[in-house]
Amino acid sequence: MSAKQNSKKSKWALDFNVSKNADMPSPPGYNPTALVNQTEVVRDQRLVIKKSWDLALGPLKQIPMNLFIMYMSGNSISIFPIMMVGMMLIRPIKAIFTTQVTSKMAEGAQGTGQRIVYILGNLANVALALYKCHSMGLLPTHASDWLAFVQPQTRLEYYGGGVSFI
């Protein structure tokens, strides 16, 4: 009866108790003796270097956008320019403190150069934010800002619009 049951088994039935080591042919196009192509390794290294330079140049690419936002926000003291200046100050400072984490993939001969470019770009963004604070009159730059008995500085010239040079 057991032989009869074995013959009635479906051809799709799996029996996990029997070990079957059938040699399967390799898929079409697969060559087990082929080595890794060296040009792909070089291409991958170039891609890593390119991506790490893109990361290092990111803060420098933000400068034109920050200049445009500074121009559009004006020199009045209201919520939008204050928040814009705050974000222009906070983001680069945070980025400078996380430089080590950000530049983990930038190692090797170009890693230090990329870190220096990244830090200099962020310092340039901080300088833009400080300039905007100065043009809005938020930085204490004269003695009258600190001392109550000193007279405020008188303006030598009044003008309208544009960029302030004082």
Image (spheres, helix red, strand yellow):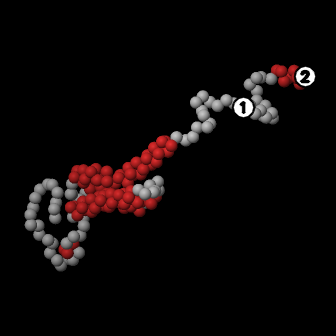
For the residues carrying marks 1 and 2, which lies nearer the camera in this image? Answer: 1
Q: Are marks 1 and 2 in contact (CB under 8 Å)?
A: no
**Image quadrant where residue 3 sits:** top right
What residue is at 48 percent from the left and 42 percent from the top? Answer: 39
SS for callout 2: loop
Foreground: 25 or 143?
A: 25
Label 1 crowd bin: few (<14), some (14–19), many (20+), radius 10 Å: few
Three-letter amino acid code at disc 2? Met
70 with respect to 7 (left or right): left
Label 2 crowd bin: few (<14), some (14–19), many (20+), radius 10 Å: few
Q: Which residue is mark 2?
A: 1
Checking the image for residue 23, the label placed there is 1
Is any atom of residue 38 visible in this view?
yes
Foreground: 124 or 117?
A: 117
Q: Earlier in the sequence, mark 1 or mark 2?
A: 2
What x and y, as percent, mark residue 153? 14, 71
What x and y, as percent, mark residue 130? 27, 63
What x and y, as percent, mark residue 69? 26, 51
What residue is at 24 percent from the left and 67 percent from the top? Answer: 139
50 with respect to 65 (left or right): right
What x and y, as percent, mark residue 32? 62, 36
Q: CA distance from mark 1 to mark 2?
A: 33 Å
Foreground: 77 or 166?
A: 166
**Image quadrant where residue 30 sits:** top right
71 with respect to 18 (left or right): left
SS for callout 1: loop
Q: Is residue 28 above or below residue 46?
A: above
